[in-house]
Image: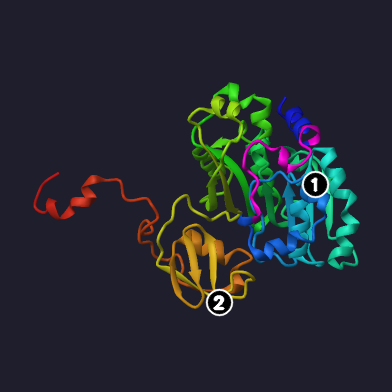
Amino acid sequence: MQHDIVKEYYGKTLQSSADLQTDACCTPDDIPAWQKTLLSNVHGEVLAKYYGCGLIAPPAIEGARVLDLGCGAGRDVYVLSQMVGEAGEVVGVDMTLEQLEVARAHEDWHRSKFGYDQANTRFIDGMIENLCDLDLEPNSFDVVVSNCVVNLSTDKRAVLDGVRRLLKPGGEFYFSDVYASRRLPEPLKNDPVLYGECLGGALYWNDFLTLAQSTGFRDPRLMTDRPLGVDNPVLQKKLGDISFFSSTYRLFNIATLEGDCEDYGQAVIYKGGIAQLEETFVLDSHHAIEKGRVFPVCGNTWLMLKESRFAEHFDFMGDFSAHYGIFPGCGKAIPFQSAHAVDDLAGTCC
């Protein structure tokens, strides 16, 4: 049922982003100048058919192979096409034929606009829950992206399993989606408009974190988030006190990541060299690493930098030979009450 809702809503009901009934789409004010330049090179019809909720432009992807889940009319594919360059490749997957027709119709236009001898884009008709059924080689993508589409999937576990299968070791799932402040009741999940507007299928945020960790993406890192407004008063009444957020996460395909941030006395130094992040590298909302500065990190952060495409831009200090407990400031502390009053227990028995 949900698949039919999505095909109908995005293939026929919506004619442009102006038809959306939430403020999920980012406004021009949200977009950095360098991304506006890339967007200015995208065909107008493609831009008009954009229904995403975030800014999917992961750094350091020149020459990379990128997969876009739920690519729609191809806006993000054509932005990423410029970022990976002619030596890279961007593959888009979508199940709405009307959207894919728009994307494919302008493929040669974009190749010429970008000055490429050959197009570095490809569009595949398929469902993101069934990535294993598509002509995509396992462990072949550096980055997988998605823009406000995973919430529309009826089997989100299958999506994450498929993504992990397609990513190279050290690869990254970098995606925006919509999350709810609580679990939605069944009537809201099956409301056609709410589902089409990316609200009915939104996961409760903590259920998402649990799902990510259970599919092997340990330690999900939040990049950005913002509250979503619902412009339609009828929809707002249905939703009541449930709030929604547009958030961007990055999940690394690194098997040795731990469930928590453990302290091994490690540190990194950012050497620079990443476009748009020359002076400060932003790993997530809690890690802004200044160039040239010794920056203490937990074991997971050390691995995310050491075993990913970012490794060449960092110097690494330390190893995993000594463990010092939970990393300070990570938000988790030792749970035992007695640990906080050790000095008061001297000389007492158990």
**Which residue is nearer to you in this view: 349 or 330?**
330
Q: Which residue is rendered at x = 37% and y = 56% of the image?
A: 326
Q: Position of residue 7 (x, y in %)?
A: 78, 33
Magenta span of residues = 11-28
Q: Position of residue 153 (x, y in %)?
A: 68, 35
Q: With 198 as the anchor, is 219 left or right in this view?
A: left
Q: Which residue is rendered at x = 56% and y = 67% of the image?
A: 306
Q: With 323 as the anchor, is 70 left or right in this view?
A: right
Q: Mark 1 is on which residue type? A: Ala
Q: Position of residue 267 (x, y in %)?
A: 45, 70
**Which residue is nearer to you in this view: 291 or 321?**
291
Q: Position of residue 178 (x, y in %)?
A: 59, 41
* Residue that mark 1 sits on: 73
Q: With 248 as the anchor, is 40 left or right in this view?
A: right
Query: Helix, strand or loop at disc 2?
Result: loop
Q: Point out the tag, 1 or 2, that comes first from the N-terminus.
A: 1
Query: Helix, strand or loop at disc 1?
Result: loop
Q: Which residue is rendered at x = 76% and y = 36% of the image?
A: 14
Q: Mark 2 is on which residue type? A: Lys
Task: Give the mark count.
Answer: 2
In the image as oriented, which residue stretches furthest toward the left? 347
Q: Main secondary structure of the magenta part?
A: loop
Q: Which mark is residue 272?
A: none
Structural distance between the alpha carbons of marks 1 and 2: 37 Å
Badge 2, how many Cα within 10 Å: few under 14, some, many 20+?
some
Vertical side of 102 occupied by 291: above or below:
below
* Residue that mark 2 sits on: 271
Q: Nearer the viewer, mark 1 or mark 2?
A: 1
Badge 1, how many Cα within 10 Å: few under 14, some, many 20+?
many
